[in-house]
Amino acid sequence: MLERPPPGAGDWRPALRPDATRSLLALLLVAIPLAGPGCGTSCEEIARHRQAFLERTERTDAPHATLTIPLALANQLVAERLAGRPGTPNQDPAEGASGSASTPRERGVAAAERPARSTPGPDQRAAKRALTERASDRLEVELLDEIGLHLGVVFTLDAVRLVPADADRVGVEVDVSVRDGRVPLFALGFTAEVRLVVDPRARTARVLLRPDQLRRVSPRLDAEGRARVTAWIRGALPDALGRALDDRALGVLADEAVAWLGEAGFPLVRDNLLDGLDEEPLIEVALPDLPLESVTVTTVGGRTPALRLGLVTPLPVTHGLGPDHRLPARGVVELRLAGETAAELANAAIARGDLPSRYTSDGEADPAGPFEARVGWGRAPRPLKVHLWRTGGECTYARVGGTPVVTVTDDEVRVAVSDGVYEVIKGPALTEAFAWTKALFGDSVRLGVAVARRVRVDAAGVALELGVAGVAVGATELRVTLQVRSVPGGPEAPMVGATTPRRGGALNRQVVSHEVTLTP
């Protein structure tokens, strides 16, 4: 049984319990041919074949693994992350300036009176936060100032969400409502496109939004909103003036007010309401527990928008993953491992001593056994391979192929193999192939699952609870589906039993960018 490492562990290798060192896995084969059937094979040839297999370094730049995260799940975490900020509609007015009717309408809180934006020190930042909590979401609009008319409005941060963007970006949309007390008048929309920030040592990636990355957009004002703004202005006018102006004149005033608020409100929102938003990532992802060389990210549009991370490892994977034309599944996080990637993870674990490398002629793990084993991935119908070498005495090379059948029950993964056969034997006959497949395939699949279990998605320490819902072995890949058991602040989703995510340690992060080379 594989065991997850403790939170924040820097080493990428999955930990193994002592009683699990009796099996390994199977999953990659770039076969290095020996002599054909019926030909004699010398010990020197078998030794050279073994050495060539162990010294492989060629690898593809195609993704060795991909991680797909639906944006709907990420955005639920973003909403939870922002729920307690001053200026959001669900905050109690007593806790900060939320745009409620109880917020005092002091005059003289105009944008021109605010300090210019600069790089503040700790004391300045604290003072600025105090200003933000008191009045930074207010803007006093001086319309018709010749008659002393003042129209006070409140800016409220309604939503921040991730959206698809160009290949090397992730889009961010910010919705801000302009309100008369608690009554919404119209909305302002801001957009940005941001890049991925990757920490290769912590194996994390994050989405960070700086307020200065935002672009202004036109106010979103439909006929109903325009009517609300017109009524708002009419209600603020002296009775005599209100009766004197017809609907057309009031409509002109409403358009002026909206245009002015959009122009003047942009820096106010950027520099105050959203100040400090970049102090914590919008979303963070703990990347799969793999050695990493590079990470690429694309966003997927359509009915289920998603972030898709492409991961390249230093492992000798010569056939990576092809394009995934399936729509992302709703409500699940999916890790795809190229078959060769899964195999090379097992071979790396063998090389480190985390999985047994030597076996008896009956397929039992034994440090003094005469057979050395590695795993591979080859062609269907039996893609999983076990390579066996005996380089002393009765020298032998054999390749066993099989197809594991994986079931998941209550988050426990079980592996069965019924079609193990010897595809190649050079040397004396061996025990039945099923003994080798039974011993060697199970932990290799579980090793891939252990890699997936380290994936976490969170925002400021609030994490999705994920559990293994399914494992599928295909002709070229291993897919692990992680279903969300619960979303913070929301109802529980139907889910196979899962462990509660560990809190503490490095925050587990999420991604955005197209191609980033990781350098330690």
Image: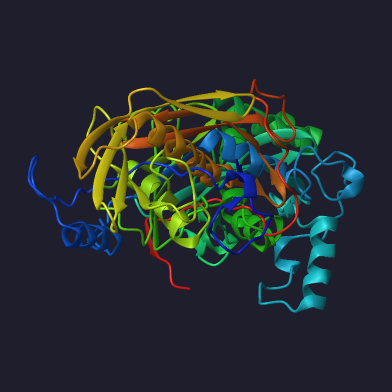
All told, the count of numbered labels is 0
Vertical order, 19 against 472 (above or below): below
Q: Position of residue 60 (x, y in %)?
A: 25, 56
Q: Is residue 118 above or below residue 44?
A: below
- Horizontal side of residue 192 vs 258, given as left or right: left
- From the top left corner, tell me how far across and down residue 376 is, in percent: 31, 45
Give the camera-side residue of 316 and 104.
Answer: 316
- Residue at screen point 71% across, 24% down: 492
In the rendered image, which quarter is residue 315 located in? bottom left
Examine the rendering and report whether any part of residue 156 can be seen: no
Find residue 399 and report its image quarter: top left
Residue furthest to the front in view is 393
- For image coordinates 78% across by 38% down, the residue present is 236
Compare residues 139 and 200 and report the one nearer the observer.
200
Q: Nearer the viewer, residue 408 or 162?
A: 408
**Where's residue 114, x and y in %?**
74, 68
In this view of the protein, can residue 369 be seen by the observer?
Answer: yes
